[in-house]
Image (cartoon, helix red, strand yellow):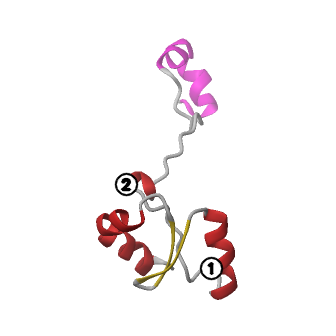
Amino acid sequence: MLEKEFKYFKDHQEDLVKKYRGKYLVIVGNEVVRVHDAEIDAYAEAKKRFKPGTFLIPHCLPGKSSYTQTFNSRVNFGVYPAKVRTSLSRKAIYGDRLR
């Protein structure tokens, strides 16, 4: 879903930025169908004209940051930090599974 629109944006990003830098584009298929100053306006207009899931609204800026988000988490998936690991006995770590 939206692979075509995303590929179009990435493939033409440099040209689109020259023409629409800082704007929000509504892309359907391989075509920019609307250009807006605000993301909410782009979404409201696109929602009226197109079925949800059929349009992409990228912020037209240079570089990967315009279409990439990075999320960081401090979740620990069962890997003990070195200080904790060395202070625990094998019995405490493995419980009854240790033979």
Front residue of 33/5: it is 33
Residue 40 among magenta residues: no
Q: In the drawing, does residue 86 fall left or right of residue 50?
A: left
- Amino acid, disc 1: Ala
What residue do we see at 62% from left, 79% from top? 46
Residue 55 image position (x, y, % from top left): 55, 79
The kind of secondary structure element at disc 2 is: helix
What residue do we see at 56% from left, 83% from top? 54
Residues in magenta, as a range: 82-98
Residue 3 image position (x, y, % from top left): 43, 77
Residue 12 image position (x, y, % from top left): 31, 71
Q: Is residue 87 above or below residue 77?
A: above
What residue do we see at 53% from left, 26% from top? 80
In which image quadrant can residue 38 be found?
A: bottom right
Task: Report the residue marked by disc 1.
Answer: 46
Q: Mark 1, mark 2: which one is toward the viewer?
A: 1
Residue 87 among magenta residues: yes
User: Spatial distance from mark 1 to mark 2, Cα to Cα?
Assistant: 24 Å
Q: Earlier in the sequence, mark 1 or mark 2?
A: 1
Look at the magenta stretch and give its main secondary structure.
Answer: helix
